[in-house]
Image: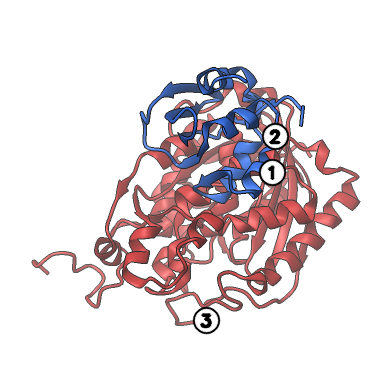
Amino acid sequence: MATIQEVMMSLPTIFKPEKAKGWNRVILFDLVGEEPSKWTLKIHDGVATVTEGETESPKLVISGNSEHLVQMFTGEVSPMKLVNAKLVKMKGPMMDSIAFSGLWNIPKKG
Amino acid sequence: METGIISYGVAVPRHRIEARVIWETWKNMAEQFFDLLSIGERGVLGPEEDTITLAVAAAKQALSRAGISKDSIGALFLGSCTSPYSMKSAATVIQDALGLPAAVLTTDIQCAEKSGSTALLLATALIESGQLDYALVIAADTLNRHTMPGMVLEYVASAGAVAFVLGKGEVIAHLERWTTHSWDQNDYFRLEGERFIQPGAGFYGWVANWGLLDHVIPATQAFFAQTGFTPADFAKFAVPQKTGLRPLMVMGKAGLDMMQVLPFVLTAQIGDCGAASVPLALAHILDWADAGERIGVIDYGSGAGCDTWSLVTTPLLEERRPTEGTVMAQLDDKILVDYATMLKYEHKMLRSANALSNFY
């Protein structure tokens, strides 16, 4: 299984910039579990950048176990399943949570 | 149509208040509704701001981007449901403030929160029929000044203005087709002589959205039926966004894809700007759109009707794309205020409207 660092650093490569034009947001991943860590994802002018730690004030906070985030972005488990089971939680405007889910080319495995 | 948008301009109040700050005073809504309804911040009028000043600011930006002489403007329509005047045209005050010629056809147009769309469609008809070369259409509202403290609408009631210079020739987007659906339904209203808006059907819950759905669905279904377009023919949509729930409802009922809609919903950042709300989303889309994109606009006026229309961007859009004063830049430029300051600025204290210091 990939590490959370590998997954977080891969986010800009699976990001769909054409879907995010005009959607500038700061998103914090606040993770516990096997690899407790914080990651700040900044989407600005259609560009996604990831930095370790909480580097900016977020509008959307995504929390859960790091292994579930790995499963989500590698396509092992669908995001909907994880959110419905409350294994991954999103805190922030519901519209942002929904829009966030449409920004990624996640491989379909599960 | 040959007629289209030559330029646009935007103005929103620089002062903002966080919904949670309002909640600290009233505690009149369950806290989890903020995320469910995507409520975050809303605009607060400065003491000197009103529908006219916001409209003038937006119009100045639109005129400066248009590259045409002010003297060639043939009509100025203000779409608003919060004109400072019950009698007298606010559009005429704006015309004078902008220094437009006296021969300009000026009028206010009121059809609840879709006043701006309706004004734009009327001006388009005058240009398309050859009676005018150019028109200035402004959608502007100050719902916040007309919302009673303690009312749940207070969490989103905001203000803003969006101006469009319309004409033929060098347009950044051609207007295409439109449909409308109007009938009397119970939703937000304000009676003659009353300052504050009243809710006909409440703020949340499915009853609160009867008016929205009873207008948006038939207007949009008629639009698709008459034009033969399908949602897949559109790159983006500007839709009603009083709360974040409404875009989701419109999206679901009209069969739109979430990424056609959600990136252009500004509720969490600025609240409900009334007649300027959907035009603000449209301006945000135009700030980012590529040439050749078809954009849909679904504009609902509380209990009054819905205009659904479309436009197609041209290569000029990319040449003339604003580099400053964009919607995002204006939303990011803000001063957060507390509840008491908001009450003072929006003239809700029991003092005369201009008494902001001890010297009066």
On the image, the x and y values in percent for residue B297 come to 69, 48
Disc 2 to disc 3: CB gap under 8 Å: no
Chain in blue in the render: A
On the image, the x and y values in percent for residue B35 come to 51, 54
On the image, the x and y values in percent for residue B137 come to 57, 49
Please give left or right for residue A42 compared with residue B77 in the image: left
Q: Chain of mark 2?
A: A
> Picture quarter containing residue A47?
top right
**Element under disc 1:** helix
| Residues at marks 2 and 3, CA–CA distance in whole angstroms | 54 Å
Determine the residue located farthest toward the front in the rendered image.
Answer: A34
> Picture quarter containing residue B237?
top right
Foreground residue among A36 and B267: A36
Q: Residue at x 8, y 66 (%)?
A: B359
- Residue B329 in sight from this viewpoint: yes
> Picture quarter containing residue B311?
top right
Disc 2 to disc 1: CB gap under 8 Å: yes
Q: Residues within 10 Å of mark 3 (few under 14, many from 20)?
A: few
**Element under disc 2:** loop
Chain in red in the render: B
Provide the residue designation for mark 3: B191
Provide the residue designation for mark 2: A77
Note whether B66 is above or below B60 in the view shown.
Answer: above
Amino acid type at circle 2 is Val
Q: Residues within 10 Å of mark 2 (few under 14, many from 20)?
A: some
Note whether B187 is above or below B171 in the view shown.
Answer: below
Q: Chain of mark 1?
A: A
Mark in the foreground, 2 or 3: 2
